[in-house]
Amino acid sequence: MGKFPLFPEQASTFAPDVDHLTYFLLAVAVFFTVLIFCSIFYLAIRYRRRSDGELPHVPHGGLALEIVWSVIPFGITMVMFTWGASVFFNESRPPNNAMPLYVVAKQWMWKIEHMEGQREINELHIPLGRAVRLTMASEDVIHSFYVPAFRVKQDVVPGKYSTIWFQPTKPGKYHLFCAEFCGTRHSGMIGWVYVMQPRDYQNWLSGGAPAGTLAESGEKLFTDLACSNCHKADGTGRCPSLEGLFGKTVQLANGAKIVADEPYIRESILHPAAKIVAGYLPVMPTFQGLVTEDGVLQLIEYIKSLGPKPIVGGGGALGK
Amino acid sequence: MSEHIDSVKTYALVFAALIAATVGTTAVAFVDLGPFSVVVALLIAVCKMLLVALFFMHVRHSTRLTRLVVLGGLLWLLILIALTMGDILTRNWVGVPGR
Amino acid sequence: MITAAVPERENYLNNAYGIKSWLLTRDHKRIGLLYLFTVTLFFFLGGAFATMIRIELLTPQGNFVSSETYNKLFTMHGVAMIFFFLIPAIPATLGNFFLPMMIGARDLAFPRINLLSWYLLVIGGLFSLFAMLAGGVDTGWTFYTPYSTTYSNSWVIATALGIFISGFSSILTGLNFIVTVHRMRAPGMTWMRMPLFVWSHYATALIQVLGTPVVAVTIILLFCERVFHIGIFDPTLGGDPVLFQHMFWFYSHPAVYIMILPAMGIVSELVSVFSRKPVFGYQFVAYASMAIAVLGFLVWGHHLFVSTQSVYAALVFSFLSYFVAIPSAIKVFNWTATLYKGSISFATPMLYAFGFIGLFTIGGLTGLFVAALGFDVHVTDTYFVVAHFHYIMVGGTIMAYLGGLHYWWPKITGRMYPEGWAKLSALIIFLGFNLTFFPQFILGYLGMPRRYHVYPDEFQVLHVLSTAGASVLAVGYLMPMIYFIWSLRYGKVASANPWGATGLEWQTPSPPPVHNFDVTPIVTHDAYDYSTVIGQEVEVG
Amino acid sequence: MPANDAHAHAESPALRVQFDTEAQQKDASTLGMWLFLITEVMFFGGMFLVYTVYRNAYPGIFAIASSSLDVYIGAANTVVLLCSSFTMVLAVRAAQLGQRKAIILFLILTLILGGIFLGVKAYEWNEKFQEHHVPGSSFHFEGMQPDEQAHAQLFFSLYFAMTGLHALHMVIGVGMLLFLIRQAQKGRYSAEYMTPVDLGGLYWHFVDIIWIFLFPLLYLIDRHLKG
Ligand code: HEA
Ligand code: HEA
Ligand code: CUA
Ligand SMILES: [Cu+2]
C-alpha cells in the first residue's frame, strides 16, 4: 500500500487548468449538496408530524420561486459549459512548434516512435517544458491514451489518426494507461511517461542505436514498396511528385481542394481511389494489407521530409 | 361514428398522382442535376409519403393526437440523423486529425 | 381510523390459483408481480457479479480471477443490472401495478400485449443468461466496435440478442402506458389531476417508444457485422466504429432517464404523502418530466468526448447536456419545498425518499462535472464516471424503488412490513452505499481507469474502503428480501389506506379486487388533496 | 360513460373488459397502432442514418454500385406496391361501408400484389447472388480496387439490410392479410366493427412508405452517370 494520495500530481500545463475547473465544480456541488441536505434536515425536523390527524395548510406555489431556481442553476451551468469548453479547446489544438511523435496502439501495448528513429514500447521519454504532439493510430481495436498527471486522454480509433498534445512541467515518472476497454489484457496496457531535463533527454536520444531516423526508415520503405518507381522527384511520368506535398493544398479531380495532412496521405496510400489528384488517372494500387500502421507513419514522415515547408500543426487556424 | 369515408375517385386520383411521381422520379434521375439530384429525389419521395399518409392513412381526418404522433416520429428521426451528421460533417474543421 | 380489509374478500391474488393462473394472467397486477419476481432475480444475479468484482479489487495484483473472467464479470454485471433489472424495474413492476389504478382504469389498454412483454423479457433474459452460463461476454455493457464485432471471442451474439428481445418488452410496455394514459382515464381524471407518478411514467414511455427501436436496429447491424463481416462498423472495410457509438448512445443516454424518471415519480408520491401536502409546483414537476424526456434525446454525444468525435459536435452536446440539468433541478427544489410547513412523517418510504434526493443530487451534480468538456477528458473511463452513475442508479433509482416497494407493499400484499427492521435497513443501505461509491470519485480523479482489474498499488486503500462498503450494502439489500417474505405471513394486516394517501389506488381494498374498482371512480379533486382523506373515514369494501 | 359498463359489455361481444365503450376501444387500438408505426420509423431510421453516413463518405462508389441495380425492375416494383396500397385502401373503404364481399376481394388483390412484389424482390436478390454482389467472402464488384470493393460491399450490405428488413415487414403484412381475409370470410367485420382492417391498412401503407424512400435512395443514385 504505502502511498495514499487524494489528489493527482500536476505535471503538465493542462493540469492546473483542469484542477481550477474542478475546484469551481466542486464548490458548486458542495454548495448545492449542503443546501439540499441542510434544508431537508431542517424542514423535516421542524415540521415533523405531531399528531396523526393533522392537516397542514396548503400554500400556493410561486412562479417567481420557480423562475429563480431555474435561472440561477442555468446561469451556473453556462459557466461550467464555457469554462469546460475553453479548457477543451486548448487541449484540442496543438501549437505549431510542438514536437511531433508517433504512437501505434495495439492489443496490448503502446509503440512509440521518435522522429530521430528511437522506438519505445510502453515507455515515453520526453523533454521537460516542450510541447509534444502525438499522432496516434491503432492496429486493431479502440484504445485510449491517458496520462492522469497531464489530465489528458484521447481515444485511438482504428482506421484513422487522432491527436493529443501536452506540455510537461515537472520532471518525473508518470502513469500511462489505456483507458478504453480493449480486450483481455486491457489493464495490462500500461506504461510510464518519463519527463526528463532537456539535457538528459538529449543524452537519452543519443544513447540508443536507432536504425536511422523515422524519415530514413520511410525512405527505405518507399523504395521497398516500389513507390519510387512511379513517384519520381521531378514529377515526370504518370504520377504527381511528392516533393513539397505536405501542407500544400491539392486540387482534386472532382473539383474539391484539400490540404495534404497526415490523414490525407494515409488515405492516399491505403485508399488511393478515394481522392484523385486533378490531372492524373486513378492507377495507384492500394497498399492496404501490404503496409502496417507503423509503415504508413514512416512513409508520411519521409514525405514530410521531402517538403521545404515546415510541419503544419493545424493548430491555431480554425478551419480554413 | 363520425368517420370520413373518402370517395373512390379521391383515392384513384391520389393513386394516379403516386404513379406519376414514381415515373417522374425515375425519369429525372437520368438528368444530371449535380448535387440537386438527391434533393429532387427526396422531395418527390416526401410528397409521395405525404399523399399516402394524408389520404390512404387518413391522417387528413384524424385527431390532433395522431398528427402529433406522426410529426413527433419524424422529428425524432431528424434529431437522430441531424446530430449524428453534425459530428461527421464537422470532423475536419479544426484541422487536427481526430478532432 | 380506517376500516380493515376483510381477508376473505375476493381479490386479484385469491381469485384463481395455480401456476397457469399466473403464467396466463392478463391482470396487470399479477403481471406486475411476475416482473417483480424476474427483476429481483436479475438484481441478485447482477449483485453476485458485483460482489465478485469488489472481491477481486481488494488487491492490486488481480489474483482472485483471471483478466478474462474479470472482464466478463463487469460486462455481465452491467448487462444484468441495466437491461434486465433497472430498465424494467420500476415501470414494469410498480408502474404496471399502479399506473392503471392511479387513473381509475380496470387494466392497461392492451392486457395481452402486457403479458407478451413479460414473456419477451423472460426470453431475452434467458438468452443472455444462457450466454453468461455458456462462457460469458467480455465487451463491456457498451459493446463497442470493432472489439465486439471482430476481436472478442465471447458470447456477444447471444447476449446482444437477449437485449434485442428484451428491448421489445420495453417498447411494448411503453406503448401500452401511453395508450392507457391517453384513453383509459376515469371520468374527471384530467391531465392536471394525474398523480406525478403517472406523469413520469408517461414521459418514460415516450423514451421507450422513441429510443429503443434504434438500439434494436443497432444490435441487428452488430449481429450482421459479427456474423457476415460486412464492414458496417469495421474500419478496414470502410466502416466507422464511432458511428456505432452514436447509435448506441442515441438510445442508451435517454435510457438513463428510463431508469430515473419513474424513480422521480415515486419520490413525488412519497414526498407528498408523508408531508400531507401537494407537491410544491405540481405543474412544474409534471412538465419537468416531459422536458427531461425530450431534452434527454439531444445529449448523447457527451459519452463521446474523447472518441474522435468532432470538437464542434462535442461543444454542442456538452452545451445541450446542461439543459437537462434544469428540469432535474426544478424537481429537487420542489420536493424540498414541499416539506415546508408540511406534516412530515418519518415512515420508511420517506427515509428512502430523503435518501434519493440527497444521493441523486450528488450523482446529478457530478453528471454536470462530466458534462464539462475539459473535466471529462480527464475523468472519462475512470472510476469517477463509475461513481457518478452508481450514485444516480443505485443511490437514486434503487432507493426510490425500495421506497416505492415499502410504500405500496400493503396495497400489493395486504400486509404491513415491519417498520423497525425497515428503518434499520434503510440506514444500512444509505451508509453502505456512500462507503462503497464515494471513494470511487477520488479514485477516478486520481486516474484509476475503469474496467481494470490489475491496478497500481497506490489505489488500494480506496478500493478496500469501497469493498468494505459493498459488504455493508449487501447486508442492507438482503434484509428487505427477508422481511418482505416474512411479512407475507406474519405482517400486520393492512387497511385500505394505511398512509392516508389520496391516490385512487388507495380508494380500493388491499389487496385490490380483480378489476381494481368495484365501481369506476369519478374524480373530482386534484391529486394530493389531503382534505379529502384526512379526518374522514375511508369507506371501502 | 361509467355506470353501465356491464350493460355495454353484454351488448357487444368484441368489447374487452378494460374498456367502457367501443369508441374508446377503437381509439385506443388506433393510437396503439400509430405508436407502433413510430417505433418502426425509428427502427428503419437507424438504417437510414447508416446509409446517410456511408453515402456521404463514399459517394462515388455508391453511385457506381447503385447503377448495377436494375432501375426498371425497381420502378415497376414500386408501381406494384403502390397498386397494392390502392387496393388496400379500397378494402378499408369497403369495410367502412360494411360491404363484406368487397372487403374480401380487395384484400385478396392486395395479397396478390404483395406476393408479386416479394417475387420480384426474390428474383432481384437471386441475380445479386449470381453476380457475386452479396456481401461476404465471395463478394466481387467488377473493375474496382480492393479497397473500393469494400466500399461497394458496404452499399450492398445496406441494400440487403434495408430491402431485407422491408421484405420481412412485407411477409408479416402478408400473414396479416391472410388473417384478415379469413376473418372477413367468417363475416367478422361490419361497418360497426372493422378496426383490424383499418389497422392492417395503416401497417400496409407504412410499409409502402418505407419503400417509397428505399427506391430512390438505393436505385436512383447518380443514374445519369451510367444511363
Ligand atoms: C439513471 C441514470 C443516469 C442519470 C439520471 C444521469 C444523469 C446525468 N448524466 Fe450520466 N451516466 C449514467 C447514468 C445516468 N446519468 C451512466 C450509466 C453513465 C456511464 C455509461 C458508461 O459509460 O458505462 C453516465 C455517464 C455520463 C457522462 C459521460 C461520462 C463519460 O463517460 O466520460 C456524462 C457526460 O456528460 C453524464 C452526464 C449526466 C448529466 C448532465 C446528467 C443530468 O441529467 C443530471 C441532472 C441532475 C442534477 C443537475 C442534480 C439535481 C440538481 C440540483 C441539486 C440543483 C443544482 C443544480 C445546478 C447547479 C444545475 N453522464
Ligand atoms: C442498475 C445498475 C447497477 C447497479 C444496481 C450496480 C450495483 C453495484 N455495482 Fe455496478 N455497474 C453498473 C451498473 C450497476 N451497478 C454498470 C452499468 C457498470 C459498467 C459496466 C461496464 O463497465 O461495462 C458497473 C460497473 C461497476 C464497477 C466497475 C467495474 C470496472 O469498471 O472494472 C464496480 C466496481 O466496484 C461496480 C460495483 C457495484 C456494486 C458494489 C454494486 C452494489 O450496489 C450491488 C449491491 C448488491 C448486492 C451486493 C447483492 C446482494 C446479494 C448478495 C450478496 C448475494 C450474492 C450471492 C453470491 C455472492 C453467491 N459496478
Ligand atoms: Cu488498450 Cu485498453
Ligand atoms: Cu449520458
Image (cartoon, rainbow, N blue to C red):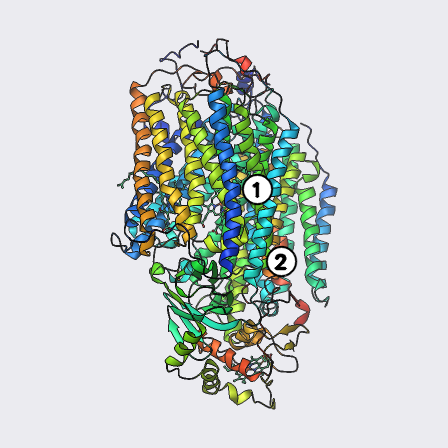
Question: What SS does tag 1 mark?
Answer: helix
Q: Position of residue C192 (x, y in %)?
A: 61, 25
Q: Amino acid at mark 2?
A: Phe
Q: Nearer the viewer, residue A194 or C43?
A: A194
Q: Is mark 1 within 8 Å of ligand 1?
A: yes
Residue C285 found in image quarter: top right
Q: Amino acid at mark 1?
A: Val
**C173 lies left or right of B88:** left
Label 2: which residue?
A: D215
The residue drawn where x is 35% and y is 25% is C422
Residue A208 found in image quarter: bottom left
The residue drawn where x is 62% and y is 21% is A60
- Are the residues tagged 2 and 1 within 8 Å (C-beta)? no
Q: Residue furthest left?
A: C64
Q: Position of residue C179 (x, y in %)?
A: 56, 32
- The image quadrant where one finds the N terminus of chain C is top left
Q: Badge 2: few (under 14), some or many (20 or more) residues near its Cα, within 10 Å?
A: many
Q: Above or below — where is D72 with respect to C396?
A: below
Q: Nearer the viewer, residue A37 or A67?
A: A37
Q: Give the letter of the chain under mark 2.
A: D
Q: Above or below — where is A104 with respect to C446?
A: below
Q: Which mark is residue C324?
A: 1
The residue drawn where x is 56% and y is 87% is A231
Q: How many marks?
A: 2
- The image quadrant where one finds the C terminus of chain C is top left
Q: Do callouts 2 and 1 point to residues on the same chain?
A: no
**C487 lies left or right of D82:** left
Question: What SS does tag 2 mark?
Answer: helix
Q: Is residue B40 visible?
A: yes
